[in-house]
Amino acid sequence: MMIGRIVLSKAGRDKGRYFLVTGIFDDRTVYIADGDVRKIENSKKKKLIHLSVYGQPDEALIREAAEASLTNKRIRALLASHVKLQ
């Protein structure tokens, strides 16, 4: 899993919601945020088995996320546009 990938939650209270991977905790756990309910300042730690990768990787998005220049507003806009396009 890479920082900047869009994922779909398969389990928990957030089941069915789309998120952006904002960090990697270990080989089985990542941090996710949606910019709305779960802000980037308070990213949720979630196991990979509870997530499904969504769509194809977007290099510009991955680069922007890796540089930590994302804002909650930008995450919301990215998720809305990518989910709508796919």
Image (cartoon, rainbow, N blue to C red):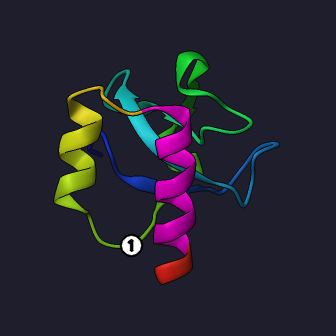
| Residue at figure coordinates x 43%, y 31% from the top left | 30
The quadrant holding residue 39 is top right
| Residue at figure coordinates x 29%, y 26% from the top left | 68
Question: Which residue is under mark 1?
Answer: 55
* Location of residue 50 in the rendering, given as x and y in whole percent from the top left corner: 59, 48
In this rendering, does residue 65 appear at all?
A: yes
Instruction: Decide which of 45, 3 is in the foreground and name it.
Output: 3
Horizontal arrangement in the rendering, residue 10 relative to residue 60 (left or right): right
- Label 1: which secondary element: loop
Q: Magenta part of the protein: which range?
A: 71-83
Residue found farthest to the right: 13
Residue 21 within the magenta-colored segment of the rendering: no
Question: Callout 1 environment at 10 Å: few (<14), some (14 to 19), or many (20+)?
Answer: some
The quadrant holding residue 6 is bottom left
The main secondary structure of the magenta stretch is: helix
Instruction: Decide which of 59, 24 is in the foreground and name it.
Output: 59
In this rendering, does residue 86 appear at all?
A: no
* Location of residue 56 in the rendering, given as x and y in whole percent from the top left corner: 30, 71
Instruction: Decide which of 74, 9 is in the foreground and name it.
Output: 74
| Residue at figure coordinates x 72%, y 61% from the top left | 16
Instruction: Decide which of 54, 27 is in the foreground and name it.
Output: 54
In the figure, 10 relative to 13: above or below?
below
Horizontal arrangement in the rendering, residue 64 relative to residue 47 (left or right): left
* Location of residue 10 in the rendering, given as x and y in whole percent from the top left corner: 66, 57
* Location of residue 51 in the rendering, given as x and y in whole percent from the top left corner: 54, 52
| Residue at figure coordinates x 17%, y 57% from the top left | 59
Horizontal arrangement in the rendering, residue 12 relative to residue 40 (left or right): right
Q: Which amino acid does label 1 sit on?
A: Gly
In the figure, 42 relative to 10: above or below?
above
Horizontal arrangement in the rendering, residue 59 relative to residue 57 (left or right): left
